[in-house]
C-alpha cells in the first residue's frame, strides 16, 4: 500500500495551523507554562516520528493516520495516508474520527465532577442510582470507573454479536446493550480484580442521566467539550460522523474494507464520541493535568490505578485508574472498535501530549499503544 506522507515543511505548516487552532480553542489559562521542558521536536526526531507512522500503516494496512506530538512548543503534526480508499482523499487536519474508548475517559470525568459537587459519592452502590444492575448493591461507582465491577463486557457476549450480525444498522439503546451483559453471570466478586468491560461505562452513563436529568452525551458537552471548546466533538448516535470525517475500515486479510454501518450507538457512553486530532490533543492535556477536577479528585483518579495483568484481554496499559490508563508514566486513554483505533496520552510533569487517530481496526488492537511507546522514546531522546 502506497502511503501519502507529508513533507516536513508541509507538516510544519500544518503544525502551525494546529497550534493556532488550539490557542483559539483553549481557555484563557494556558495549559503550558514557561518550564524548560517545553520544546519543539527537533528535525531528526520528526523524521523518526514519521518513520514510526509509516511502518505502522505499512504493516497493518490501515489506510490513514493523524498524529500529533505536542511538547508544549510548536506541535508536530503528521497526516499520512488517505481518509477514503475509493476517492483517494488524503487525511486532513479537520477530519473527524471515532474516538472509541477515549469516550470512557470523558464519561468518568463527568462522574468525578458530580462527586466533587456532592451529587454522588464514589463509594455509592450503583443500585442507589440504577436498580437494574445485577448485584448492584455490592458494586460501587468507584469499581465501575476502575473496571473492577465483575460485570461482563456486553460487546463480547454471543447475544450481542448475533444481534449485530442480524442487523448491522440497528440503533441500540443503553438498555439493550446492558441487557446483553446482565443476562450473563458476573465474572468475579466486585473489587476482586481488574477486567476492562465497556458495560461499566454504559452503566455510568445511566447514572449521569439519573442525576443530571440529561443523557450522558449532553452532560459531556455541557461539562467537558463546551468548557474546553472542543467544537468538533459530538455523539453521532444512529447517524454517521459529521463531515469532514475519515471513513473507517476493517482490515480483512490485509485489505482495508469499508465499514458500511458505523453506528455509534453500538458503543454508547463506552465509545460513541467522535472528533478531530487537535481537539483530542486538547482533551489529552485536560485529562492528564486534571484541570476540570479538583486536585484531590485527580489524585484519587490516578491513585486508584492497579496493574492490568489480571485481564489478558485488556487494552495495553501498565495500570488503570478511574477512567484513565497509564503507560510508561504517561496518563490517558486508548480506544478500539469497528473501523477506528485511537490513543491520547499526557505526561503532566513535562507538559507533553501524544495523540493518535487511525481510520482502521487492524488485528493488533494495541497498535496505537505500540506506536505511542516508540514516539515517546524518540521524544525522550535528547541526543543531538
Image (cartoon, rainbow, N blue to C red):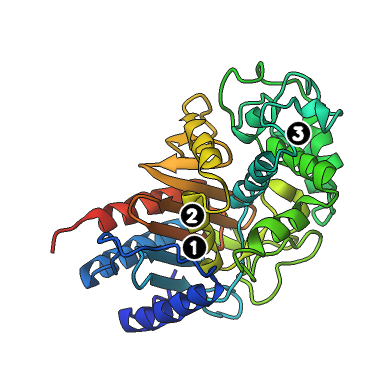
Residue 382 horizontal side relative to residue 19, left or right: left
Residue 185 horizontal side relative to residue 147, left or right: right
Horizontal and vertical percent for residue 108?
64, 43
Horizontal and vertical percent for residue 37?
27, 59
Q: Is residue 3 above or below residue 155?
A: below
Q: Secondary structure at mark 2?
A: strand
Say whether marks 2 and 1 touch (CB < 8 Å): yes
Q: Which mark is residue 300?
A: none
Q: Is residue 62 above or below residue 205?
A: below
- Measure how far apart labels 3 and 2 are at the Cα level: 31 Å
- Measure how far apart labels 2 and 1 are at the Cα level: 7 Å
User: Where is residue 123, by image quadrant?
Assistant: top right
**First-in-chain label (3 vs 1):** 3
Residue 5 horizontal side relative to residue 179, left or right: left
Which quarter of the rendered picture does the N terminus lie within?
bottom left
Mark 3 neighbour class, 10 Å CA radius: few under 14, some 14 to 19, many 20 or more: few
Q: Nearer the viewer, residue 170 or 323?
A: 323
Residue, disc 3: 158
Which residue: 36% across, 65% down?
72
Q: Secondary structure at mark 3?
A: helix
Horizontal and vertical percent for residue 230?
61, 67
Residue, disc 2: 344
Which residue: 84% across, 47% down?
166
**First-in-chain label (2 vs 1):** 1
Which residue: 47% across, 51% down?
289
Mark 1 neighbour class, 10 Å CA radius: few under 14, some 14 to 19, many 20 or more: many
Q: Is residue 117 above or below residue 45?
A: above
Q: Residue furthest left?
A: 384
Horizontal and vertical percent for residue 379?
28, 58
Residue, disc 1: 281
Nearer to us: label 3 or label 2: 2
Amino acid at each position: 500500500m502506497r502511503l501519502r506522507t507529508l513533507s516536513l515543511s508541509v507538516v510544519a505548516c500544518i503544525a502551525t495551523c494546529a497550534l493556532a487552532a488550539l490557542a483559539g480553542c483553549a481557555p484563557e489559562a494556558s495549559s503550558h507554562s514557561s518550564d524548560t521542558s517545553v520544546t519543539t521536536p527537533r528535525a531528526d526526531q520528526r523524521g523518526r516520528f514519521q518513520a514510526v507512522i509509516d511502518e505502522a500503516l505499512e504493516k497493518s494496512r490501515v489506510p490513514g493516520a493523524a498524529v500529533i506530538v505536542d511538547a508544549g512548543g510548536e506541535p508536530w503534526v503528521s497526516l499520512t495516508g488517505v481518509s477514503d480508499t475509493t476517492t483517494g482523499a488524503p487525511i486532513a487536519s479537520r477530519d473527524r474520527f471515532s474516538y472509541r474508548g477515549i469516550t470512557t475517559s470523558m464519561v468518568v470525568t463527568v462522574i468525578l465532577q458530580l462527586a466533587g459537587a456532592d451529587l454522588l459519592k464514589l463509594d455509592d452502590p450503583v443500585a442507589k442510582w440504577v436498580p437494574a444492575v445485577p448485584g448492584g448493591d455490592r458494586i460501587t461507582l468507584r469499581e465501575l470507573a476502575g473496571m473492577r465491577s465483575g460485570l461482563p463486557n456486553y460487546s463480547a457476549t454471543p447475544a450481542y454479536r448475533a444481534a449485530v450480525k442480524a442487523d448491522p444498522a440497528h440503533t441500540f439503546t443503553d438498555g439493550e446493550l446492558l441487557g446483553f451483559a446482565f443476562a450473563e453471570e458476573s465474572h468475579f466478586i466486585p473489587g476482586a480484580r481488574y477486567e476492562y468491560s465497556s458495560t461499566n461505562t454504559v452503566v455510568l452513563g445511566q447514572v449521569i442521566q439519573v442525576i443530571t436529568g440529561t443523557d450522558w452525551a449532553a452532560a459531556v458537552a455541557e461539562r467537558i467539550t463546551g468548557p474546553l471548546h472542543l467544537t468538533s466533538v459530538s455523539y453521532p448516535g444512529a447517524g454517521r460522523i459529521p463531515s469532514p470525517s475519515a471513513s473507517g475500515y476493517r482490515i480483512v486479510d490485509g485489505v482495508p474494507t469499508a465499514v458500511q454501518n458505523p453506528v455509534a450507538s453500538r458503543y454508547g457512553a463506552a465509545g460513541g464520541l467522535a472528533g478531530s486530532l487537535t481537539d483530542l490533543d486538547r482533551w489529552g492535556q485536560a485529562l492528564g493535568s486534571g484541570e476540570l477536577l479538583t486536585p484531590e479528585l485527580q489524585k484519587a483518579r490516578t491513585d486508584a490505578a492497579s496493574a492490568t495483568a489480571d485481564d489478558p484481554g485488556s487494552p495495553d496499559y501498565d495500570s488503570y485508574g478511574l477512567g484513565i490508563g497509564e503507560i510508561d508514566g504517561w496518563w490517558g486513554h486508548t480506544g478500539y472498535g469497528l473501523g477506528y483505533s485511537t490513543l491520547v496520552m499526557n505526561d503532566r510533569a513535562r507538559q507533553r501530549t501524544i495523540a493518535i487517530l487511525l481510520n482502521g481496526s487492524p488485528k493488533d488492537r494495541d497498535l496505537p499503544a505500540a506506536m505511542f511507546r516508540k514516539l515517546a522514546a524518540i521524544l525522550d531522546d535528547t541526543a543531538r
